[in-house]
Image (cartoon, rainbow, N blue to C red):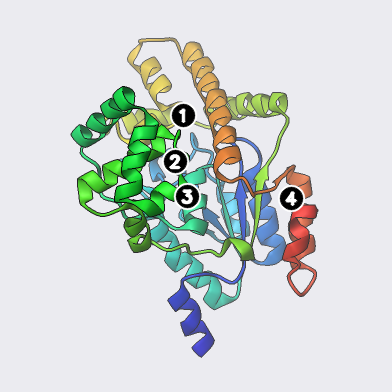
Amino acid sequence: MSHERDHHQEGKVERAVLIAGPTASGKSALAVLVAERLGGIVINADAMQVYRDLRILTARPSAAEEARVPHRLFGHVDAADTYSVGRWLRDVAPVLEEAARRGVVPIVVGGTGLYLKALTGGLAAIPPIPASTREALRSRLADQGAGALHAELTQRDPVAAAKLSPGDGVRIVRALEVIEATGRPLSAWHRAGMPALVDPQKALKVVLSLERGKLQQRIDVRFDAMMANGALAEVQALRARRLDPLLPAMKAHGVPRLIAALKGDISLLEAVDAAKRDTRRYTKRQLTWFRNQLPDWPWRTAADAERAILKTFAAPPLDLDAWPLL
């Protein structure tokens, strides 16, 4: 019992499987298979699959998949809400505690890399920065150059300055704008933020890899299946709510294009083609983000990832050192 209390105070599970990957790469199927084999639970880390109004168009797990293993944080948010990474961390914490209490493996899966990065690295509790502050510093960056601003940052926040290249204008401006707006250095906000909930050294991490042509083909086939399964009616129901078009759910892939078709601005065929194109472009951005922001995550095919995960968990004690080599 005392061990469980200590565990909850730390807020970290002892072991977890984290599966990232671009849209249509097979993440959900892999997560269900692994959860079934390990007796685990599947936890959503996709910013669009949280919305209950968009089951079809966001390719949320089917009722049959959800019946095979427990699923959490899928479709639990109304489309009128603006969801955030901070809110996701608050939502996922009790789910991870549930997994720890039950002694089951949490399998966190999704294409929203920021969620996964925050899960293992925490999140700074920085308040919004006024646009005027940001614009003034960007203007100074253009006029004075990154070197001059880095020298200023060295005086005002030496901890942040030491971590940044003198030529990294974007991050230097970010550190200065936090000081200007809040009176506190970025390092202080990081210390005060939300802690990591999963120890990255005790988690099996993977980015699913798929040949580009095959990924694009899967995107097209999947969108056609969505249309056949009622995506247009789903968007029609969402449109009938007359929500702000700037809400995240209203900008989900396919929603703006299908709304345009429903309004008669474009044909349905044009809407489908454009939605597929939007999704293909988005996967390119996802892959770039994963490479840059999750540099220590191994890239594997779904089949290789499955074998590695099951092999690792089947070999006591947990052979974490072998994971990057598999």
The image shows residue 225 at horizontal and vertical percentages of 59, 29
The local secondary structure at tag 3 comes to helix
- Label located before the other in sequence (4 or 1): 1
Between 39 and 171, the one nearer to me in the picture: 171
Cα separation between marks 4 and 3: 20 Å
Name the residue type under label 3: Tyr
Work out whether residue 227 or residue 42 is closer to the camera in this orientation and state it.
42
Q: Which mark is residue 115?
A: 3
Q: Who's the residue at 63% across and 66% down the image? A: 202
- In this picture, residue 66 sits left or right of residue 145: right
Examine the rendering and report whether any part of residue 78 can be seen: no
Query: According to the image, label 1 marks what residue?
Result: 253
30 over 203 or under it: above or below = above
Q: Residues within 10 Å of mark 2 (few under 14, many from 20)?
A: many
Q: Residue at x 71, y 34 (%)?
A: 210
Q: Which residue is mark 4?
A: 305
